[in-house]
Amino acid sequence: MSDDDLPKDLSHITPAYRRALLIVVLLNIGYGLVEMVGGFFADSQALKADALDFLGDGLITLLGLIAIGWSLKWRANSALIQGIFLGAMGIAVLAYTIYRTQVLHTPEAGLMGIFGFIALMINIIAAVVLIPHRKGDANVRAVWFFSRNDALGNILIIIAAGFVFWTGTSWPDLIAAGVIAILFLQSSWSIIKDARNDLKKSKSL
């Protein structure tokens, strides 16, 4: 079946969209591994949270790539799994961040800023690749939400690094990690809601 023969609900699927997803998968998983190492070196909870977001995004985007040819029902189920996974990550990051408030270690502000800036550049590239494909079913919107979250999280990390340097405390880092976790939960709710709507549509087809 060619892309021109796809059903209306799959009209957003093109070879360019598949390539865009593959690029996003490689960018997210590749830099997620780099940033996780950087998070441990910098002792930054915000960097670790962002690295987890990168890795989760890469794996979930890979699932979205695999799900491209599936029916609306199964693509909606795929998005539902993505939303639940993102919510679980948000809860885990939030819980560990709360724990870290009891075990304070001041992160290395310079490394935080460097890794945060590189991560922002990576996410800008991913966002530019995805902009033409951000509208579609719940699966497509989920991928867009992930990239948007990453970019916002990176900006927070850069700002937090400046405040860590200025205050000499770990609180800006922990606050940034908490905000990233809340972004996870907000996007999780949106993705799950979209997926449920698509599941309802699939029953009427």
Image: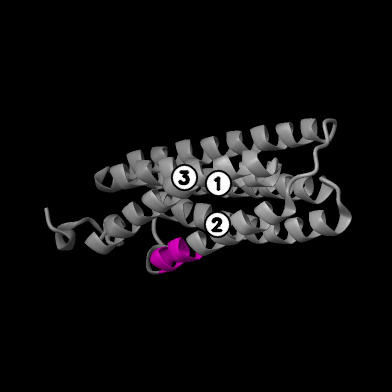
Residue 131 in which image quadrant: bottom left
Q: Residue at x 38, y 49 (%)?
A: 25
**Residue 144 screen position, x and y as percent:** 47, 57
Residue 24: which quarter of the image? Answer: bottom left
Give x and y (percent) for residue 122: 49, 60
Taking 77 as reference, is 121 left or right?
A: right
- Contact? badges 2 and 1 (CB < 8 Å): yes
Mark sitting earlier along the chain (1/3): 1
Dot 3, how many residues are within 10 Å of its Cα: few (below 14), some (14-19), or many (20+)? many
Q: Amino acid at mark 2?
A: Ala
- N-term mark: 2 or 3: 2
Over which residues does the magenta segment extend?
124-131
- Magenta stretch holds residue 139: no
Report helix, strand or loop for mark 2.
helix
Image-based side of 17 in relation to 185, left or right: left
Q: Is residue 49 visible?
A: no
Which residue in the structure is indicated by mark 2?
Answer: 119
Q: Earlier in the sequence, mark 2 or mark 1?
A: 1
For the residues labelled 2 and 3, the Cα–Cα distance comes to 28 Å
The residue positioned 83% from the left and 36% from the top of the image is 104
Image disc number at residue 195 = 3
- Residue 35 - label: 1
Q: Residue furthest left?
A: 1
Single out the mark in the foreground, 2 or 3.
2
- At 63% from the left and 43% from the top, the residue drawn is 39
- Label the magenta part by its dominant secondary structure: helix
